[in-house]
C-alpha cells in the first residue's frame, strides 16, 4: 500500500488517501471470498453434536455483509463458497466407508443450491427491508434442495441445527421453513443493525424507518419464538404408554455389517430377551410394546423360517408387540419394511419405507453410473422399491407412526404419519455404516425438531446408536451410547392435538417461496428502471 500526503491548503478534516498496490488490490479482492467460506464453516459449527446453535446468527450476518450490494454473478460465486464452507465438513460422514469421491460430488452438487440462493440474496440486497427478502430467498433454496435431484436431499436445513436454540418453538408454528426463516432473518437483521449504526456514527444521516426495519428483522424472530412457547409441552392428552427401545448393536461398523445379517438379528433378539428377564425380575417396568431399529433383520422373516423363529421367540419372551425393521422381497420387489410382530399372531401389519436413499437403497441412472464406475453397481445390486402408504401401527392401543431413518429429513414424510392419526412417532434407523461420525447426532437433532414441530413423543431405535427417547418438547430423556447393546424403557405421553405446523403443512414454505419470488421480481424491475434511467 502507498500513502499520498495532503497539501497544506487542504482541510484538516481530510485524511491521508490510501492507494492499494496491485498486489494489495488482489488480496483485497480475496477478502469477500475468504469471508464467505469462513462464515459457511461458522454455520457448520452451529450444528450437532455441538450445542452452539447461536453461531448461525453471526454466520448469516457475515454472509449478509459479503453479499449486500453485489451483483448476482458475484453472489453466485460467493454463495457457492459459503455452501462449500458449510457442507464440506457437515457431510464428511457420507465418505466414511466409500471414500472421498461421493462426498465431494454430493457437496459440489448441493452447494449449487446455496450458490443460487446467494445470487438471489445479492439481487434483493438493494431493496428496502432486504433482510426479509433475503431470508425468504434462503428458504426457497432449501425448498428446492429438498426436492431435486433424485427426490431431494434436505440434510443441513438451518432448522436442524436449532434443536437446542431459543427459536425451536417456531417449529410448531410453521415447521422447519418458518424456524429456518427466523434464524436467517435474525442473522441478516443483526448485520443491518450494525451497518446502520456504523453509518450513523459516520454521517448522522440514517433514516428512522430503515433503522426500525433493521431492528425488527433482528428482534421479531426472537419475540415470535417466545410467543410460540405455549405451543410446546409434554402433557399427555390420550394417556400414556410404556415404550421399550432396543439397540442390539452390530458385530462391526462399516459396510461389512451387512455380511453379518444373522448376527445383527441375533443381537436384537438377545437384547430383547435380556430385557424380558429384567422385567420378570421386577428391575424394569413392563413395556406395552417394543421398537427395534431399521435393518434389525436383514434376513427376510417371511422367506426364512430360522429368522421368523428368532423374532417370534423374542416377541414371546417379552410378551408384547415388536416393530421389527426388516429387508423383505415381495412379488419381485425389494422393500425396506417395518413389521408389526404380535407375540401370539406373528406378523400382523407392515410399513414400507417411502423415501428411499439414492446411491444407498437405489441407484439413479444405473447404466450411466455403471459405465463410469462399476463399484456402485456392485454395492447396490438391486434397487429397493418405494412404499406408497403412511405407516401407523396400533400397538397396545396406541397409534405409532413409523418414519424410517432417512425419511426424518423430509417434512412431508413425518407430517403424513401425524395426519394419519399417529399419537407417537418412531424413527427406526441404521447408522452403523457411518461409524462414529457426526451423522447420528445430526439425525437425532432432526428428531428433536420433529417432536416439537408436531408435539409428539419421538423414539429413535438405532442398530448401533445413538438411540433415544424424546418428549414432545424436544427434550431427550433417555439415550444410549454408540456401539453398545442396550435398551431404553420409559412411560411417555400420547398426544392427538395438532400444532399449526401440522395443520398448515406445506403452506408456510409455499408462502416463503412466493416471498422470495416477489423480492426477486422487485429487484429485476428496479434494475430495469435503473438501466433505462442510465440510457436516458
Image (cartoon, rainbow, N blue to C red):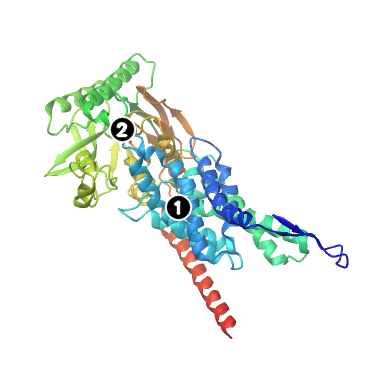
The residue furthest top is 281
Determine the CA span between mark 2 and mark 1.
Answer: 27 Å
Q: Residue at x 30, y 25 (%)?
A: 250
- Outermost residue toward the bottom in this view: 536
Q: Front-most of 250 and 510? A: 250
Numbered disc 2: secondary structure: loop
The residue singled out by tag 2 in the image is: 293
Q: Quadrant of residue 9?
A: bottom right
Q: Which residue is mark 1?
A: 501
Say few, some or many: other residues with alpha carbon within 10 Å of mark 2 (under 14 / 14 to 19 / 20 or more).
many
Quadrant in which residue 100 is drawn: top left
Left or right: 79 in relation to 353: right
Quadrant, the C terminus: bottom right
Q: Is residue 308 shown left or right of residue 210?
A: left
Which one is closest to the eye, mark 2 or mark 1?
A: 2
Picture residue at 17% right of the left edge, 33% below the top = 300
Residue 56: image location, x then y, percent: 55, 46
Quarter of the image that includes the N terminus: bottom right
Residue 161, disc: none
Element type at mark 1: helix
Residue 139 point in image, percent of width and height: 47, 57
- Contact between labelled residues 1 and 2, with CB atoms less than 8 Å apart: no
The picture places residue 262, in percent across and down from the top left corner, at 20, 25
Q: Position of residue 305 (x, y in %)?
A: 12, 27
Say left or right for 126 vs 452. right
Return the residue nearer the eye: 293 or 77.
Answer: 77
Q: For mark 1, does the 10 Å Cα neighbourhood hold few (<14), some (14 to 19), or many (20 or more) residues?
A: many
Question: In this picture, is 355 found above or below 203?
Answer: above
Decide which of 380, 290 is in the foreground and name it.
Answer: 380
Amino acid at each position: 500500500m502507498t500513502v499520498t500526503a495532503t497539501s497544506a491548503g487542504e482541510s484538516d478534516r481530510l485524511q491521508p488517501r490510501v492507494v492499494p498496490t496491485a498486489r494489495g488490490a488482489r488480496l483485497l479482492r480475496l477478502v469477500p471470498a475468504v469471508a464467505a467460506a469462513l462464515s459457511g464453516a461458522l454455520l457448520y459449527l452451529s450444528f450437532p453434536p455441538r450445542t452452539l446453535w447461536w453461531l448461525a446468527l453471526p454466520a448469516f450476518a457475515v454472509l449478509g455483509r459479503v453479499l449486500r450490494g453485489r451483483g448476482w454473478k458475484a453472489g453466485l460465486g460467493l454463495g457457492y463458497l459459503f455452501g462449500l464452507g458449510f457442507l464440506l465438513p457437515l457431510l464428511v460422514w457420507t465418505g466414511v466407508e466409500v471414500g472421498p469421491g461421493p462426498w465431494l460430488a454430493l457437496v459440489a452438487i448441493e452447494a449449487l443450491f446455496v450458490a443460487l440462493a446467494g445470487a438471489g440474496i445479492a439481487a434483493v440486497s438493494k431493496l428496502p427491508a432486504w433482510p426479509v427478502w433475503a431470508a425468504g430467498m434462503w428458504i426457497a433454496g432449501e425448498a428446492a434442495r429438498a426436492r431435486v435431484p433424485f427426490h431431494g436431499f434436505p440434510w443441513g436445513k438451518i432448522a436442524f441445527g436449532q434443536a437446542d436454540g431459543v427459536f425451536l418453538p417456531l417449529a410448531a408454528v410453521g415447521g422447519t421453513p418458518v424456524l429456518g426463516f427466523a434464524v436467517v432473518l435474525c442473522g441478516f437483521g443483526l448485520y443491518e443493525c450494525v451497518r446502520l449504526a456504523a453509518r450513523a456514527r459516520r454521517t448522522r444521516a440514517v433514516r428512522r424507518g430503515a433503522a426500525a426495519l433493521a431492528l425488527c428483522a433482528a428482534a421479531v424472530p426472537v419475540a415470535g419464538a417466545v410467543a410460540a412457547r405455549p405451543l410446546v409441552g409434554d402433557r399427555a392428552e390420550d394417556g400414556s404408554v410404556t415404550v421399550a427401545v432396543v439397540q442390539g448393536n452390530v458385530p462391526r461398523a462399516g459396510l461389512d455389517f451387512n455380511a453379518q445379517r444373522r448376527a445383527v438379528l441375533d443381537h436384537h433378539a438377545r437384547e430383547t430377551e435380556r430385557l424380558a428377564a429384567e422385567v420378570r425380575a421386577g428391575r424394569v417396568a413392563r413395556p406395552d410394546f417394543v421398537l427395534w431399529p431399521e435393518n434389525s433383520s436383514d434376513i427376510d422373516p417371511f422367506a426364512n423360517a430360522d429368522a421368523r423363529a428368532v423374532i417370534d421367540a423374542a416377541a414371546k419372551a417379552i410378551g408384547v408387540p415388536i416393530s421389527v425393521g426388516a429387508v423383505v422381497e415381495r412379488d419381485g420387489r425389494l422393500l425396506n419394511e417395518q413389521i408389526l410382530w404380535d407375540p401370539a399372531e406373528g406378523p400382523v401389519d407392515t410399513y414400507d419405507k417411502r423415501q428411499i436413499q439414492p446411491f444407498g437403497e437405489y441407484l439413479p441412472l444405473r447404466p450411466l453410473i455403471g459405465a463410469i464406475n462399476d463399484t456402485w453397481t456392485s454395492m447396490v445390486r438391486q434397487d429397493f422399491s418405494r412404499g406408497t402408504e403412511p405407516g401407523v401401527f396400533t400397538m397396545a392401543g396406541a397409534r405409532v407412526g413409523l418414519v424410517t431413518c432417512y425419511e426424518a429429513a423430509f417434512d412431508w414424510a413425518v407430517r403424513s404419519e401425524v395426519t394419519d392419526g399417529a399419537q407417537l412417532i418412531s424413527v427406526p434407523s441404521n447408522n452403523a455404516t457411518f461409524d462414529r461420525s457426526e451423522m447420528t447426532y445430526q439425525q437425532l437433532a432432526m428428531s428433536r425438531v420433529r417432536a416439537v414441530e408436531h408435539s409428539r413423543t419421538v423414539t429413535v431405535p438405532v442398530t448401533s446408536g445413538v438411540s433415544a427417547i424424546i418428549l414432545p418438547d424436544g427434550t431427550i430423556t433417555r439415550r444410549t451410547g454408540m456401539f453398545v447393546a442396550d435398551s431404553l424403557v420409559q412411560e411417555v405421553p400420547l398426544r392427538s392435538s395438532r400444532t399449526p405446523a401440522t395443520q398448515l403443512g406445506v403452506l408456510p414454505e409455499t408462502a416463503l417461496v412466493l416471498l422470495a419470488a416477489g423480492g426477486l421480481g422487485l429487484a429485476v424491475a428496479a434494475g430495469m428502471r435503473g438501466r433505462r434511467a442510465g440510457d436516458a
